[in-house]
Amino acid sequence: MKIKNSRKPKGSVIAALDIGSSKIACFIARVIDSDGNLEVVGIGHQESRGVKNGSISDIHAAETSIRKAVHTAEKMAAEILKGYPLEEVIINIPAKHAISHNIAVDVDILGHEVTDGDINKALFKAQKQIVTPEHELIHTIAAGFTIDNQMGIRQPKGMVGQNLTVDVHMVTGNPTSLRNLAVPVERSHLDISAICLSSYAAGLASLVEDEMDLGCTLIDMGGGITSIAAFQGCNMIWSDSVPLGGNHVTNDLAKGLLITPADAERIKTLYGHAIASGMDDSETIEIARIGEEGLNKIKQVPRAQIIGIIQPRLEEIFEIIRVKLEDTGVGALVGRRVVLTGGACQLPAMRELAQLVLNKQVRLGRPIRVNGLAEAVNSPAFATTAGLLTYYAEREDEMPSNIIANDNGENIWEKVRSWLKENW
């Protein structure tokens, strides 16, 4: 999968393309200062076609949705783009196509000060251990450092010791799935400047610094899948996914009430609730049954029946997440803070249900790190899209291609010092 990558100076334009199961969204942003802060100047989103449960199911339909979303964003950002079309985008990869790896890599420093070259050497060694024809690297994250058994070091540069150990969290993707995801983007005449795990992007967009530092679990509830990412020490340390999302709740309603998926989505949005209450039995909803005509077409159902279909599926999603967090030990490591993002998390009482099942403190997250977002898109549903921009602006050093480039581009004095350390 070819990735075109270069750092963007102040005044340049970058774009994020979020390819989801329910919607495809495009944000165009301008770099407003030398620190990489961004202002969104163009927004476009379309109902997702050709994408099912996080995978491309129809390339032509997906391409059409991508073109429409990008074109809408381009029209809004016309003054900034000055009549030129977008050329590059950052895209997301659904967590179902990714695998999380954690390894520790040792580098001998032999009493010298730790340099960027030493850290990059460790990251490069980690990448070589993971890369196979079945795994394509997406992220290489230095999650922690140890110097001569002194653990918990955040920034080792300039410190001295004999041995440097780097805890590296890497995310790899399935090459075939990545390629299928790239095809409709490339057919839309767009280069891919970077790729980022969906849940990682959502976390970068919506978590405050203390949550990322002390420990937090990000749950991104999409239409086709629910993605999970654990953060600690301001880095992502683990990721996973559950193959269930908001669309599965909609399908449950369509089957249980014998209605069309479109009607089921409408009823879920207007009358859905994550937790049943005693008042639901007294409220009835009119629904139109599939294939019926005349008096038999419309029937009344109590709202309690609707919630009785919705709640078990949501409980199932959170229960699977709870088990994953417990079995891996991540839940105890990152603490009791959970942030929900994604369009499917916006159902009333979702936060309360998550707290009940997970036994953790839960809040809803929205994008907080980009400027210029309209109120309509400043919501949990667009956290991933906004986070793609944040990732590109702030986490460029985690891109595997840059680590390889830095290793190959090591200056002559770094090469001499490395040789002396390894041979004397």
Image (cartoon, grey):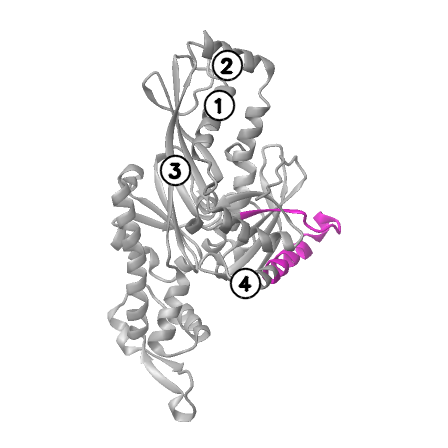
- Residue 418, labelled with which disc? 2
Q: Residue at x 44, y 75 (%)?
A: 263
Q: Which region is colored magenta?
A: 64-91
Answer with left or right where residue 1 lies relative to residue 272: right
Q: Which residue is mark 3?
A: 101
Residue 232 seen from this side: no
Give the mark nearer the N terminus: 3 vs 2.
3
Residue 72 is a magenta residue? yes
Query: How far from the left and from the top, in percent, is residue 400?
Result: 52, 34
Label 1: how many Cα within 10 Å (few below 14, some 14–19, many 20+):
many
State the quadrant of the C terminus.
Answer: top left
N-terminal of the pair, mark 3 or mark 1, is 3
Q: Which residue is mark 1?
A: 121
Question: In the depicted view, which residue is nearer to us: 118 or 391?
Answer: 118
Q: Position of residue 284 (x, y in %)?
A: 33, 79
Q: Secondary structure at mark 1?
A: helix
Which residue is at 48% across, 54% downward?
Answer: 379
Instruction: Indicate the position of residue 297 as horizontal and vertical percent values.
Output: 40, 88
Which residue is denoted by mark 4 in the rendering?
58
Spot the residue most to the bottom: 294
| Cα distance in 3D space between marks 4 and 3 | 31 Å
